[in-house]
Image (spheres, helix red, strand yellow):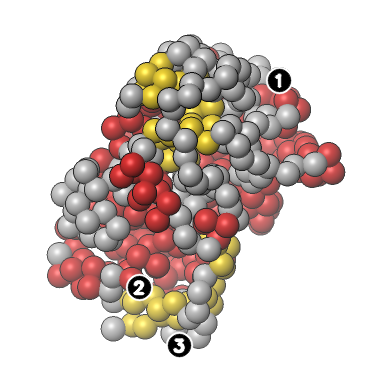
Amino acid sequence: MATTAPDATRAINPFDVSQNALYTDDTWREPFARLRAKMPVSWCPQSPFGAYWSVVTHAPVMEVELAPQVFSSSHALGNITIADTPPETSLANFIAMDAPGHTEQRKVVAPAFSPSQMVKADALVRQRTHELIARLPVGETFCWVNDVAIPLTIGMLCVLFDFPWDERADLKLWSDWASNVQPDRDADYNQRFLAEMQRMLVRFDALMDDRRQRPPSDDLLSRMVHSTAMGNLNPFERISNLALLVVAGNDTTRNSMAGLVEALARYPAQLDILRADPSLIANAAQEIVRWQSPVTHMRRTATADYTLHGQTIRAGEKVVMWYISANRDETVFADAERFDVTRDNARRHLGFGHGSHRCVGARLAEVQLATLIEELVSQRIRVVPQGEPTRLASSFLHGFTQMPVQIIRE
Protein backbone atom coordinates (compact mmCIF):
# COMPACT_ATOMS: atom_id res chain seq x y z
CA MET A 1 0.00 0.00 0.00
CA ALA A 2 1.06 3.61 -0.56
CA THR A 3 2.95 5.13 2.33
CA THR A 4 2.99 8.78 1.22
CA ALA A 5 0.44 11.26 -0.08
CA PRO A 6 0.31 11.24 -3.90
CA ASP A 7 1.62 14.18 -5.91
CA ALA A 8 -1.04 16.53 -7.28
CA THR A 9 0.60 16.33 -10.70
CA ARG A 10 0.37 12.57 -11.17
CA ALA A 11 -1.75 11.17 -14.00
CA ILE A 12 -4.98 9.83 -12.51
CA ASN A 13 -6.26 6.68 -14.17
CA PRO A 14 -9.97 7.05 -15.12
CA PHE A 15 -10.35 3.26 -15.16
CA ASP A 16 -9.91 0.61 -12.53
CA VAL A 17 -8.47 -2.11 -14.73
CA SER A 18 -8.33 -4.53 -11.80
CA GLN A 19 -12.07 -5.23 -12.12
CA ASN A 20 -12.82 -8.86 -12.94
CA ALA A 21 -15.76 -7.84 -15.13
CA LEU A 22 -13.36 -6.41 -17.74
CA TYR A 23 -11.99 -9.92 -18.26
CA THR A 24 -15.10 -12.05 -17.82
CA ASP A 25 -16.97 -9.76 -20.27
CA ASP A 26 -13.91 -9.46 -22.57
CA THR A 27 -14.12 -5.64 -22.53
CA TRP A 28 -10.55 -4.88 -21.43
CA ARG A 29 -9.23 -3.75 -24.82
CA GLU A 30 -10.73 -0.25 -24.95
CA PRO A 31 -9.67 1.01 -21.50
CA PHE A 32 -6.12 -0.23 -22.00
CA ALA A 33 -5.96 1.30 -25.49
CA ARG A 34 -7.00 4.67 -24.05
CA LEU A 35 -4.43 4.39 -21.28
CA ARG A 36 -1.66 3.50 -23.74
CA ALA A 37 -2.56 6.54 -25.82
CA LYS A 38 -2.98 9.07 -23.01
CA MET A 39 -1.20 7.88 -19.87
CA PRO A 40 1.19 4.90 -20.14
CA VAL A 41 1.95 5.25 -16.42
CA SER A 42 -0.97 6.29 -14.25
CA TRP A 43 -2.21 6.25 -10.66
CA CYS A 44 -5.46 4.60 -9.55
CA PRO A 45 -6.12 6.10 -6.11
CA GLN A 46 -8.92 3.73 -5.13
CA SER A 47 -9.81 0.13 -5.96
CA PRO A 48 -10.84 -3.04 -4.12
CA PHE A 49 -7.09 -3.79 -4.01
CA GLY A 50 -6.13 -0.35 -2.75
CA ALA A 51 -4.22 2.33 -4.64
CA TYR A 52 -1.85 1.26 -7.39
CA TRP A 53 0.16 2.42 -10.39
CA SER A 54 -0.68 1.00 -13.82
CA VAL A 55 2.15 0.55 -16.33
CA VAL A 56 0.58 -0.33 -19.67
CA THR A 57 3.09 0.10 -22.51
CA HIS A 58 6.04 -2.01 -23.55
CA ALA A 59 9.04 0.23 -22.74
CA PRO A 60 7.99 1.25 -19.19
CA VAL A 61 7.11 -2.36 -18.33
CA MET A 62 10.58 -3.41 -19.50
CA GLU A 63 12.11 -0.63 -17.41
CA VAL A 64 10.36 -1.83 -14.26
CA GLU A 65 11.34 -5.44 -14.95
CA LEU A 66 14.98 -4.47 -15.40
CA ALA A 67 15.20 -2.46 -12.16
CA PRO A 68 14.62 -5.09 -9.43
CA GLN A 69 16.79 -3.07 -7.06
CA VAL A 70 13.99 -0.44 -7.03
CA PHE A 71 10.90 -2.51 -7.87
CA SER A 72 10.74 -5.38 -5.42
CA SER A 73 8.98 -8.73 -5.89
CA SER A 74 9.32 -9.65 -2.22
CA HIS A 75 6.35 -11.21 -0.47
CA ALA A 76 7.39 -9.24 2.60
CA LEU A 77 6.55 -6.00 0.77
CA GLY A 78 3.40 -7.17 -0.96
CA ASN A 79 4.13 -10.14 -3.25
CA ILE A 80 3.71 -10.31 -7.05
CA THR A 81 -0.03 -9.79 -7.59
CA ILE A 82 -2.20 -6.70 -7.21
CA ALA A 83 -3.79 -8.18 -4.10
CA ASP A 84 -2.31 -7.45 -0.67
CA THR A 85 -2.80 -10.90 0.77
CA PRO A 86 -2.73 -11.53 4.53
CA PRO A 87 0.66 -12.73 5.80
CA GLU A 88 -0.73 -16.16 6.63
CA THR A 89 -1.75 -16.75 3.00
CA SER A 90 1.00 -14.79 1.20
CA LEU A 91 2.99 -17.33 -0.80
CA ALA A 92 6.69 -16.80 -0.09
CA ASN A 93 8.05 -18.63 -3.11
CA PHE A 94 11.13 -17.87 -5.17
CA ILE A 95 9.26 -15.70 -7.65
CA ALA A 96 8.15 -13.55 -4.71
CA MET A 97 11.74 -12.90 -3.65
CA ASP A 98 14.51 -10.53 -4.60
CA ALA A 99 18.17 -11.42 -5.08
CA PRO A 100 20.07 -13.21 -3.70
CA GLY A 101 17.34 -15.58 -2.46
CA HIS A 102 15.50 -15.52 -5.76
CA THR A 103 18.68 -16.22 -7.71
CA GLU A 104 19.75 -19.13 -5.52
CA GLN A 105 16.39 -20.90 -5.60
CA ARG A 106 15.82 -20.24 -9.29
CA LYS A 107 19.14 -21.98 -10.03
CA VAL A 108 17.76 -25.12 -8.40
CA VAL A 109 14.66 -25.23 -10.61
CA ALA A 110 16.10 -23.93 -13.89
CA PRO A 111 18.00 -27.12 -14.94
CA ALA A 112 14.69 -28.98 -15.14
CA PHE A 113 13.89 -26.72 -18.12
CA SER A 114 17.33 -26.76 -19.77
CA PRO A 115 17.69 -27.44 -23.51
CA SER A 116 18.75 -31.03 -22.85
CA GLN A 117 15.69 -31.62 -20.68
CA MET A 118 13.45 -30.06 -23.30
CA VAL A 119 14.82 -32.51 -25.87
CA LYS A 120 13.71 -35.32 -23.58
CA ALA A 121 10.32 -33.70 -22.97
CA ASP A 122 9.73 -33.05 -26.66
CA ALA A 123 9.17 -36.69 -27.59
CA LEU A 124 6.71 -37.23 -24.75
CA VAL A 125 4.84 -34.00 -25.49
CA ARG A 126 4.54 -34.99 -29.15
CA GLN A 127 3.29 -38.47 -28.37
CA ARG A 128 0.67 -37.36 -25.86
CA THR A 129 -0.52 -34.45 -27.97
CA HIS A 130 -0.79 -36.56 -31.12
CA GLU A 131 -2.78 -39.27 -29.33
CA LEU A 132 -5.14 -36.84 -27.63
CA ILE A 133 -5.88 -34.84 -30.79
CA ALA A 134 -6.36 -38.02 -32.84
CA ARG A 135 -9.03 -39.21 -30.36
CA LEU A 136 -11.13 -36.05 -30.50
CA PRO A 137 -14.70 -36.73 -31.69
CA VAL A 138 -15.76 -35.26 -35.03
CA GLY A 139 -19.14 -33.55 -35.10
CA GLU A 140 -19.67 -33.70 -31.33
CA THR A 141 -19.54 -30.73 -28.98
CA PHE A 142 -16.96 -30.96 -26.21
CA CYS A 143 -15.10 -28.56 -23.93
CA TRP A 144 -11.67 -27.62 -25.27
CA VAL A 145 -10.51 -26.50 -21.83
CA ASN A 146 -11.50 -29.67 -19.98
CA ASP A 147 -10.80 -32.19 -22.72
CA VAL A 148 -7.66 -30.79 -24.35
CA ALA A 149 -5.92 -27.91 -22.54
CA ILE A 150 -6.13 -29.29 -19.02
CA PRO A 151 -5.12 -32.90 -19.82
CA LEU A 152 -2.11 -31.73 -21.83
CA THR A 153 -0.81 -29.32 -19.19
CA ILE A 154 -1.62 -31.44 -16.15
CA GLY A 155 -0.02 -34.41 -17.87
CA MET A 156 3.22 -32.49 -18.27
CA LEU A 157 3.10 -31.45 -14.60
CA CYS A 158 2.84 -35.11 -13.64
CA VAL A 159 6.00 -35.76 -15.65
CA LEU A 160 7.91 -32.82 -14.18
CA PHE A 161 7.07 -33.87 -10.63
CA ASP A 162 6.92 -37.61 -11.33
CA PHE A 163 3.45 -37.26 -9.78
CA PRO A 164 0.90 -40.12 -9.92
CA TRP A 165 -1.32 -39.69 -12.99
CA ASP A 166 -4.39 -41.05 -11.21
CA GLU A 167 -4.14 -38.14 -8.73
CA ARG A 168 -3.96 -35.45 -11.43
CA ALA A 169 -7.31 -33.88 -10.45
CA ASP A 170 -5.69 -32.69 -7.24
CA LEU A 171 -3.04 -30.79 -9.19
CA LYS A 172 -5.71 -28.84 -11.05
CA LEU A 173 -7.61 -28.14 -7.83
CA TRP A 174 -4.49 -26.86 -6.06
CA SER A 175 -3.55 -24.77 -9.07
CA ASP A 176 -6.99 -23.12 -9.09
CA TRP A 177 -6.78 -22.30 -5.39
CA ALA A 178 -3.24 -20.95 -5.57
CA SER A 179 -3.90 -18.70 -8.58
CA ASN A 180 -7.15 -17.15 -7.33
CA VAL A 181 -6.48 -13.42 -6.84
CA GLN A 182 -9.55 -11.76 -5.31
CA PRO A 183 -10.08 -8.65 -3.15
CA ASP A 184 -12.75 -10.20 -0.90
CA ARG A 185 -10.96 -13.12 0.66
CA ASP A 186 -12.70 -13.44 4.04
CA ALA A 187 -11.68 -15.59 7.00
CA ASP A 188 -13.68 -18.58 5.76
CA TYR A 189 -12.05 -18.41 2.34
CA ASN A 190 -8.59 -18.13 3.88
CA GLN A 191 -9.27 -21.12 6.09
CA ARG A 192 -10.33 -23.26 3.10
CA PHE A 193 -7.34 -22.01 1.11
CA LEU A 194 -4.93 -23.00 3.86
CA ALA A 195 -6.62 -26.39 4.25
CA GLU A 196 -6.09 -27.17 0.55
CA MET A 197 -2.51 -25.94 0.66
CA GLN A 198 -1.88 -28.12 3.70
CA ARG A 199 -3.35 -31.13 1.90
CA MET A 200 -1.08 -30.39 -1.05
CA LEU A 201 1.93 -30.18 1.28
CA VAL A 202 1.17 -33.52 2.94
CA ARG A 203 1.00 -35.24 -0.45
CA PHE A 204 4.14 -33.62 -1.82
CA ASP A 205 6.07 -34.13 1.40
CA ALA A 206 5.50 -37.85 1.02
CA LEU A 207 6.85 -37.66 -2.52
CA MET A 208 9.83 -35.57 -1.44
CA ASP A 209 10.65 -37.95 1.40
CA ASP A 210 10.76 -40.70 -1.19
CA ARG A 211 13.14 -38.63 -3.35
CA ARG A 212 15.49 -38.11 -0.41
CA GLN A 213 15.98 -41.84 -0.18
CA ARG A 214 16.99 -42.07 -3.84
CA PRO A 215 19.98 -40.73 -5.78
CA PRO A 216 19.42 -37.27 -7.32
CA SER A 217 17.48 -37.26 -10.59
CA ASP A 218 16.09 -34.77 -13.09
CA ASP A 219 12.55 -34.34 -11.76
CA LEU A 220 11.76 -31.11 -9.95
CA LEU A 221 11.14 -32.63 -6.53
CA SER A 222 14.46 -34.45 -6.58
CA ARG A 223 16.27 -31.26 -7.55
CA MET A 224 14.61 -29.42 -4.68
CA VAL A 225 15.29 -31.92 -1.90
CA HIS A 226 18.89 -32.54 -2.95
CA SER A 227 19.80 -28.84 -3.13
CA THR A 228 21.29 -26.53 -0.52
CA ALA A 229 19.00 -23.61 -1.42
CA MET A 230 15.71 -25.54 -1.29
CA GLY A 231 16.45 -28.77 0.52
CA ASN A 232 15.60 -27.45 3.99
CA LEU A 233 12.64 -25.15 3.39
CA ASN A 234 10.16 -24.76 6.23
CA PRO A 235 6.57 -26.02 5.65
CA PHE A 236 5.19 -22.68 4.50
CA GLU A 237 8.09 -22.15 2.12
CA ARG A 238 7.49 -25.62 0.69
CA ILE A 239 3.79 -24.88 0.20
CA SER A 240 4.62 -21.59 -1.48
CA ASN A 241 7.13 -22.99 -3.95
CA LEU A 242 5.02 -26.02 -4.79
CA ALA A 243 2.00 -23.78 -5.42
CA LEU A 244 4.09 -21.59 -7.71
CA LEU A 245 5.35 -24.53 -9.76
CA VAL A 246 1.88 -26.04 -10.05
CA VAL A 247 0.34 -22.76 -11.23
CA ALA A 248 3.21 -21.86 -13.56
CA GLY A 249 3.26 -25.30 -15.12
CA ASN A 250 -0.48 -25.45 -15.65
CA ASP A 251 -2.55 -22.28 -15.85
CA THR A 252 -0.51 -20.16 -18.23
CA THR A 253 -0.05 -22.84 -20.91
CA ARG A 254 -3.63 -24.04 -20.46
CA ASN A 255 -4.96 -20.55 -21.11
CA SER A 256 -2.74 -20.05 -24.15
CA MET A 257 -4.01 -23.33 -25.59
CA ALA A 258 -7.57 -22.13 -25.17
CA GLY A 259 -6.67 -18.70 -26.50
CA LEU A 260 -5.34 -20.40 -29.63
CA VAL A 261 -8.82 -21.65 -30.46
CA GLU A 262 -10.30 -18.18 -30.07
CA ALA A 263 -7.52 -16.59 -32.12
CA LEU A 264 -7.87 -19.06 -35.01
CA ALA A 265 -11.66 -18.66 -34.96
CA ARG A 266 -11.33 -14.87 -35.25
CA TYR A 267 -8.57 -15.10 -37.86
CA PRO A 268 -9.25 -18.38 -39.71
CA ALA A 269 -6.88 -17.60 -42.57
CA GLN A 270 -3.96 -17.97 -40.16
CA LEU A 271 -4.48 -21.73 -40.00
CA ASP A 272 -4.29 -21.88 -43.79
CA ILE A 273 -1.03 -19.93 -43.67
CA LEU A 274 0.40 -22.45 -41.21
CA ARG A 275 -0.70 -25.37 -43.38
CA ALA A 276 1.04 -23.79 -46.35
CA ASP A 277 4.20 -23.07 -44.36
CA PRO A 278 4.66 -25.22 -41.23
CA SER A 279 8.01 -23.51 -40.57
CA LEU A 280 5.91 -20.70 -39.05
CA ILE A 281 4.61 -22.93 -36.24
CA ALA A 282 7.32 -21.96 -33.72
CA ASN A 283 6.58 -18.29 -34.38
CA ALA A 284 2.85 -18.95 -34.02
CA ALA A 285 3.52 -20.31 -30.52
CA GLN A 286 5.17 -17.01 -29.61
CA GLU A 287 2.36 -15.04 -31.19
CA ILE A 288 -0.38 -16.80 -29.22
CA VAL A 289 1.40 -16.01 -25.95
CA ARG A 290 1.53 -12.36 -27.04
CA TRP A 291 -2.06 -12.30 -28.26
CA GLN A 292 -3.58 -14.17 -25.32
CA SER A 293 -1.26 -12.85 -22.57
CA PRO A 294 -2.12 -15.69 -20.15
CA VAL A 295 -0.67 -13.73 -17.19
CA THR A 296 -2.58 -10.45 -17.17
CA HIS A 297 -0.30 -8.63 -14.75
CA MET A 298 2.58 -8.79 -12.33
CA ARG A 299 3.06 -6.45 -9.40
CA ARG A 300 6.12 -4.85 -7.84
CA THR A 301 6.55 -2.59 -4.83
CA ALA A 302 8.77 0.48 -5.05
CA THR A 303 11.58 0.54 -2.50
CA ALA A 304 12.67 4.08 -3.39
CA ASP A 305 11.29 7.10 -5.22
CA TYR A 306 11.61 6.63 -8.98
CA THR A 307 10.57 8.61 -12.05
CA LEU A 308 8.98 6.42 -14.72
CA HIS A 309 7.76 7.94 -17.98
CA GLY A 310 7.49 11.35 -16.31
CA GLN A 311 5.60 10.08 -13.25
CA THR A 312 7.12 10.08 -9.77
CA ILE A 313 6.53 6.78 -8.01
CA ARG A 314 7.05 6.98 -4.25
CA ALA A 315 8.69 4.35 -2.08
CA GLY A 316 6.13 1.89 -0.77
CA GLU A 317 3.70 2.27 -3.64
CA LYS A 318 2.26 -0.64 -5.62
CA VAL A 319 3.29 -0.83 -9.28
CA VAL A 320 1.29 -3.14 -11.57
CA MET A 321 2.71 -4.12 -14.96
CA TRP A 322 -0.17 -4.99 -17.28
CA TYR A 323 1.36 -7.49 -19.70
CA ILE A 324 -1.99 -7.85 -21.45
CA SER A 325 -1.73 -4.19 -22.50
CA ALA A 326 2.01 -4.03 -23.20
CA ASN A 327 1.53 -6.93 -25.62
CA ARG A 328 -0.95 -4.75 -27.55
CA ASP A 329 1.42 -1.77 -27.74
CA GLU A 330 1.04 -0.52 -31.33
CA THR A 331 4.42 1.22 -31.22
CA VAL A 332 6.03 -2.23 -30.92
CA PHE A 333 3.50 -4.58 -32.54
CA ALA A 334 1.92 -3.24 -35.75
CA ASP A 335 -1.83 -3.98 -35.98
CA ALA A 336 -1.41 -5.39 -32.48
CA GLU A 337 -4.94 -6.72 -32.05
CA ARG A 338 -4.49 -9.03 -35.03
CA PHE A 339 -3.31 -12.60 -34.44
CA ASP A 340 -0.59 -12.92 -37.07
CA VAL A 341 1.55 -16.05 -37.30
CA THR A 342 3.95 -14.25 -39.63
CA ARG A 343 4.60 -11.40 -37.17
CA ASP A 344 8.34 -10.76 -37.37
CA ASN A 345 8.77 -9.60 -33.77
CA ALA A 346 6.35 -11.89 -31.94
CA ARG A 347 9.22 -12.93 -29.64
CA ARG A 348 9.29 -9.43 -28.15
CA HIS A 349 6.13 -10.24 -26.22
CA LEU A 350 6.13 -9.90 -22.44
CA GLY A 351 3.84 -12.84 -21.80
CA PHE A 352 6.55 -14.60 -19.79
CA GLY A 353 7.82 -11.44 -18.12
CA HIS A 354 11.31 -10.09 -18.67
CA GLY A 355 14.67 -9.86 -16.93
CA SER A 356 15.64 -11.89 -13.89
CA HIS A 357 12.04 -12.92 -13.20
CA ARG A 358 11.24 -14.18 -16.70
CA CYS A 359 9.27 -17.43 -16.45
CA VAL A 360 11.71 -20.26 -15.84
CA GLY A 361 9.46 -22.72 -17.69
CA ALA A 362 8.92 -20.54 -20.77
CA ARG A 363 10.70 -22.95 -23.09
CA LEU A 364 8.51 -25.86 -22.00
CA ALA A 365 5.38 -23.80 -22.60
CA GLU A 366 6.66 -22.93 -26.09
CA VAL A 367 7.28 -26.62 -26.84
CA GLN A 368 3.78 -27.59 -25.70
CA LEU A 369 2.10 -24.82 -27.69
CA ALA A 370 4.11 -25.45 -30.84
CA THR A 371 3.35 -29.17 -30.64
CA LEU A 372 -0.38 -28.53 -30.30
CA ILE A 373 -0.33 -26.21 -33.31
CA GLU A 374 1.69 -28.75 -35.28
CA GLU A 375 -0.90 -31.45 -34.59
CA LEU A 376 -3.78 -29.21 -35.67
CA VAL A 377 -1.88 -28.50 -38.88
CA SER A 378 -0.68 -32.04 -39.65
CA GLN A 379 -4.01 -33.69 -38.79
CA ARG A 380 -5.82 -30.95 -40.75
CA ILE A 381 -8.13 -30.08 -37.89
CA ARG A 382 -10.13 -26.88 -37.60
CA VAL A 383 -11.63 -26.15 -34.19
CA VAL A 384 -15.01 -24.43 -34.41
CA PRO A 385 -16.44 -22.68 -31.31
CA GLN A 386 -20.01 -23.66 -30.42
CA GLY A 387 -21.15 -20.61 -28.49
CA GLU A 388 -19.37 -18.14 -26.27
CA PRO A 389 -16.69 -19.39 -23.86
CA THR A 390 -16.84 -18.77 -20.13
CA ARG A 391 -13.95 -16.57 -19.11
CA LEU A 392 -11.95 -16.71 -15.89
CA ALA A 393 -12.99 -14.18 -13.25
CA SER A 394 -9.50 -12.89 -12.57
CA SER A 395 -7.39 -9.82 -13.18
CA PHE A 396 -4.26 -11.95 -12.71
CA LEU A 397 -4.68 -14.86 -15.13
CA HIS A 398 -6.33 -14.32 -18.51
CA GLY A 399 -8.12 -17.49 -19.43
CA PHE A 400 -11.19 -19.64 -19.76
CA THR A 401 -13.17 -22.09 -17.65
CA GLN A 402 -15.39 -23.49 -20.41
CA MET A 403 -15.04 -23.45 -24.22
CA PRO A 404 -17.58 -25.53 -26.19
CA VAL A 405 -16.22 -26.54 -29.60
CA GLN A 406 -16.53 -29.04 -32.41
CA ILE A 407 -13.75 -30.13 -34.73
CA ILE A 408 -13.74 -30.48 -38.50
CA ARG A 409 -11.15 -32.62 -40.27
CA GLU A 410 -10.47 -30.90 -43.57
The residue shown at (47%, 12%) is 304
Neighbor class of circle 2 (other Cα within 10 Å; few <14, some 14-19, many 20+) is some
SS for dot 2: helix
Which residue type carries mark 2? Ala
Q: In which quarter of the image is the N terminus?
A: top right
Q: Name the residue under label 2.
A: 265
Whether label 1 touches label 2, CB < 8 Å: no
Point out which mark residue 139 bears: 3
- Comparing 136 with 46, the one in front is 46
Is residue 400 shown above or below 362? below
Which is more N-terminal, label 3 or label 1? 3
Which residue type carries mark 1? Asn
SS for dot 3: loop
Q: Nearer the viewer, mark 3 or mark 2?
A: 2
Q: Mark 1 points at which residue?
A: 234
- Residue 8 lies, in percent from the top left, at 48, 24
Q: Is residue 378 visible?
A: no
Which is more N-terminal, label 2 or label 3? 3
* Residue 278 position by quadrant: bottom left
3D distance between C-alphas at marks 1 and 3: 51 Å
